[in-house]
Image (spheres, grey):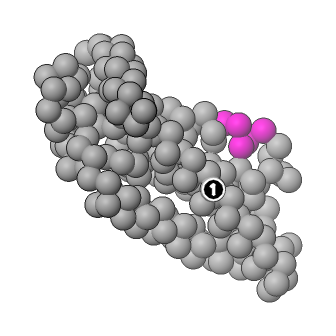
Amino acid sequence: MLDQILQYDKELFLYLNNWGSETWDDLWLVITYKFSSIPLYATLLFLIYKRLGWKALLLIVVIIAAMITFTDQITNVFKDTFQRPRPCRAEGIVDLTRFIAPRCGKYGFFSGHASNSMSTAIFAGLLLKPYFKNLIYLLLVWSLVVAYSRIYVGVHYPIDIICGLTFGGLSGFGFFKLAQYLIKRFSLQQ
């Protein structure tokens, strides 16, 4: 059964990865580049500052740093434990892959880009929901686009992405609850 699921995963990866074309490659490389989202992060931090103030912002920056560290480290534990080769390294599939990423890491299960973007989307979306009701939906779309970019550039299978998004969503929710508690505990809300 697991072998069949992994086979479907490879087939879906090849289908989605081969949608790409040279016309769109540069756009997807920008989307997948980890520093491309800095303007979004800066905007979210500014909105948090405007709605919650400096003291809450400082606490939230610490919580966000802990959240990203947590998701990154757990992602690395999974990659080192499962040691599933990325499609750009997998025998029998690498020759069929449109690999356009600048590099190919060793293992891919699960996607750190997917988990980090989803944790950020859930965390910031829930934190700002009282002030910007629909922001969370935009952030979820952004996270899904970032996650798909990993398939497009040839470095992750769909299961890597789905598991990364799920883990990121759970992490983002957990750290949001922690932030809520600490903001109330230390009376940091304006």
The residue under the point 80% across, 46% down is: 132
Q: In this view, does 145 lie above or below 160?
A: above
The residue under the point 54% across, 67% down is: 67
Tell me if I can see residue 24 in this picture: no
Q: Is the magenta stretch mostly helix, strand or loop?
A: helix
* Residue nearest the viewer, comparing 7 with 45: 7
Q: What element carries label 1?
A: helix
The residue under the point 86% across, 73% down is: 190
Pinpoint residue 35: horizontal percent, then vertical percent.
Answer: 38, 50
* Residue nearest the viewer, comparing 150 with 170: 170
Q: In this view, does 117 lie above or below 73?
A: above
Q: In this view, does 69 lie above or below 103?
A: below
Tell me if I can see residue 68 in this picture: yes
At label 1, which amino acid type do we have? Leu
Does the segment drawn in magenta span residue 69? no
Q: In this view, does 92 lie to the left or right of 48?
A: left
Q: In this view, does 52 lie to the left or right of 31?
A: right
Q: In this view, does 130 lie to the left or right of 15?
A: right
The residue under the point 25% across, 34% down is: 87
The image quadrant where one finds the N terminus is: top left
Pinpoint residue 182: horizontal percent, then vertical percent.
Answer: 75, 79
Q: Name the residue under label 1.
A: 170
Pinpoint residue 37: horizontal percent, then vertical percent.
Answer: 47, 46
Pinpoint residue 113: horizontal percent, then vertical percent.
Answer: 42, 48
Which residues lie in the magenta part? 134-138
